[in-house]
Amino acid sequence: MARIVVTGGAGFLGSHLCRALLGRGDEVVCLDNLITGALSNIEDLFGRAGFTYVEHDVSTYVWVPGPVDVVMHFASPASPADFERIPIQILKVGSLGTHNTLGLAKAKGARYFLASTSEVYGDPQVHPQPESYWGHVNPIGPRGVYDEAKRFAEAMTMAYHRAHDLDVRVVRIFNTYGPQMRPDDGRAMSNFVVAALRGEPLTIFGDGSQTRSFTYVDDEVRGFLALLDSEVATPTNIGSDAEHSIADLARMVVEVTGSTSPIVHHPLPIDDPTQRRPDLTKARTELGWEPTVDVRDGIARTAEWFRKELDRS
Ligand code: NAD
Ligand code: UDP
């Protein structure tokens, strides 16, 4: 049993992570400024033994009284729709927020866990992407605010590991979906499922031939815990390696939800990666982890959740 600080704990992944940690008996201190998160994501955790919530912007400074065993830095907007809306906040939480949370971990003698991303590979020229690939990122494009902040965050984390002997874990997360995504989040999976349920057009950006590998949230969080509990201090891909084109994803969402929505095309955003699939050799061999949820099953579970949410609102 450990006392774990989770930044971004009121967000999509952070809230699932807080729940999983509490479920295995850990104590959780959740820090969030609610810029893209929501208290509704963690409403079931209030009043639960071992859970504390503090509304706080971790880009300013971070301090948590008492002992801390682990700091898990998940705070950061993650949807491409947010990259143009709140670019400076994204750069700050990836840089200053990472520095502040590393400082907390160092002061407490805690293990540090960084939520990084497949976006560090940019528009990859190596496929699938092993952790050894250095990536192909446009630093000054609209996506650069996120990609470069995460690349800086990884550099800073590994520097603390080398210079201060900090015990670190770095997960490179691939597109993850499931209950608790924001309906207006802007990501492909939530946009498609919500549009399908509302009978509105599904909007494919570009011709839909670009690919992604979609991971169901339960698999992803199980991967976080496997990495957290391991001795692997270098970046590790956690994501599904079942690769789908965006056009296929749109068709699957329509089929699985039984929707009559049409599929339409909009222009492709600047620097949109053409392909993405993790090489999972490291996760499989060093963590014994692999994804289990088939994407059609995951879409069905996600749609069931969104259906209730849309009814509720
Ligand atoms: P999210 O937007 O749902 O969650 C992010 C949370 O961080 C929100 O609750 C937000 O309010 C909070 N936050 C942002 N800036 C903050 C700040 N300065 N101080 C305190 N809290 C702050 O996004 P998510 O999809 O849950 O992503 C969580 C983490 O996982 C992020 O670091 C993201 O980069 C990473 N990630 C997610 C995906 C994915 O597919 N969901 C893929 C790769 C990486
Ligand atoms: N996309 C799309 N329609 C949407 C939202 C996204 O076609 O309504 C495309 C987007 O251009 C990208 C892919 O789907 O090629 C995945 O986008 P998402 O925002 O989910 O994640 P990311 O681009 O960060 O992988």
Image: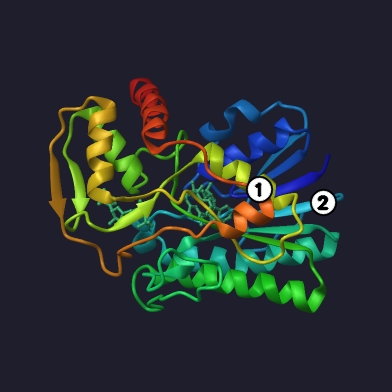
User: Image point 34% across, 69% down: which residue?
Assistant: 142
User: Image point 28% across, 51% down: which residue?
Assistant: 245
The answer to whether 45 appears left or right of 90 in the picture is right
Secondary structure beneath dot 2 equals loop
User: Image point 23% across, 33% down: which residue?
Assistant: 254
- Which corner quadrant of the image does residue 141 belong to? bottom left
- Which corner quadrant of the image does residue 154 belong to? bottom right
Secondary structure beneath dot 1 equals loop
Q: Which is in the foreground here, disc 2 or disc 1?
A: 1
Asked whether the viewer can see residue 259, the reply is: yes
Does 17 appear above or below 136? above
Mark 2 or mark 1, earlier in chain:
2
Q: Which residue is mark 1?
A: 288
Query: Which three-letter amino acid code belongs to the residue tagged 2?
Result: Val
Asked whether the viewer can see residue 184, the reply is: no
Quadrant location of the C terminus in the rendered image: top left
Query: Which three-letter amino acid code belongs to the residue tagged 1?
Result: Gly
- Number of other residues with Cα within 10 Å of mark 1, as a class: few under 14, some 14 to 19, many 20 or more: few
User: Where in the figure is residue 70, as x and y percent of width and height?
Assistant: 77, 52
The numbered disc on residue 313 is: none
User: Where in the figure is residue 276, as x and y percent of width and height?
Assistant: 39, 60
The numbered disc on residue 68 is: 2
User: Where in the figure is residue 144, as x and y percent of width and height?
Assistant: 41, 72
Alpha carbon separation for disc pair 2 and 1: 27 Å
User: Where in the figure is residue 156, as x and y percent of width and height?
Assistant: 65, 74
Does 41 appear above or below 158? above
